[in-house]
Amino acid sequence: MDPPGDTDWETIHRQLLAYVTWRAGHYRWQRGGKIDLTAGETVEDIVQEVLVRTLRGTRRWDPTRGPLFPWLQDQARSIIDALARSAAHRREVRIPDSGDLDDDPFGCLAADPLEILLRKEAQRQAEIQVHVLRQMVADTPELAVVLDAILAGGECRPRYLAATLGVPPADIYNRLKRLRRCAVRLVGTYSGRKSS
């Protein structure tokens, strides 16, 4: 049955939003809050979904089984529980922002410790490799300048490098080839393979 025509939807929306926020707080969401849940869903999304389903008649309220608002709460709880059991929620790993760490001194928002360690190790290895690559080209100023320009701006397209360094693009193509050969040797060294 459709809800009565004199239903105060504004009040119901506000109360249902408070309920969904409270209910979502029973779970530890990978996104880290009571507002952002999982798979891009928010508490507001859940409230909207429940109300739209009710108004469209996709979910039908039976007044003989109880008042409207507790029924709406059951509908919302069903959606929240399904999200908490979803594959998206189980697979998401939240990496905290630096601002989160300031607000979370006890590490409650931290992601999977193994994931954090692997990311830190990969970053450390990349920094070491860049340092070694810089040393490899230190005696070749024309390559060192290109490498510094790439690392400073992150742009490695020849025409941008040529404009930045004030040299012809053909010269940059040549320098990039030489720089890539150094990088291939370096990667071969770190992977245990010999490179020519």
Image (spheres, rainbow, N blue to C red):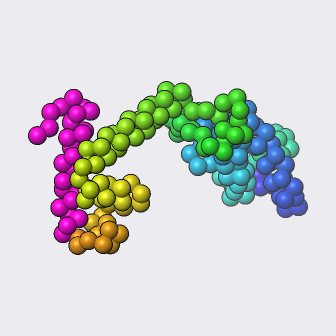
- Between 61 and 126, the one lying in front of the other is 126
Question: Quarter holding the C terminus?
Answer: top left
Q: Is residue 175 magenta?
A: yes
Against 131, is 3 above or below? below
- Between 58 and 87, the one lying in front of the other is 87
- Between 194 and 68, the one lying in front of the other is 194
Residue 69 drawn at (x, y percent) = 83, 46
Against 86, is 60 above or below? below
Residue 132 drawn at (x, y percent) = 31, 40
Q: Main secondary structure of the magenta part?
A: helix
**190 to the left or right of 124:** left
**165 to the left or right of 13:** left
Q: Please tell me which residue is depicted at 56% across the width and 45% down the height of the picture.
A: 39
Residue found farthest to the front? 139
Can residue 159 be seen here? The reply is no
Residue range of the region highlighted in magenta in the rendering:
170-196
Residue 136 drawn at (x, y percent) = 25, 44
Q: Please tell me which residue is depicted at 38% across the width and 54% down the height of the picture.
A: 151
**145 to the left or right of 118:** left
User: Could you say which quadrant of the image residue 171 lies in?
Assistant: bottom left
Residue 16 drawn at (x, y percent) = 80, 48
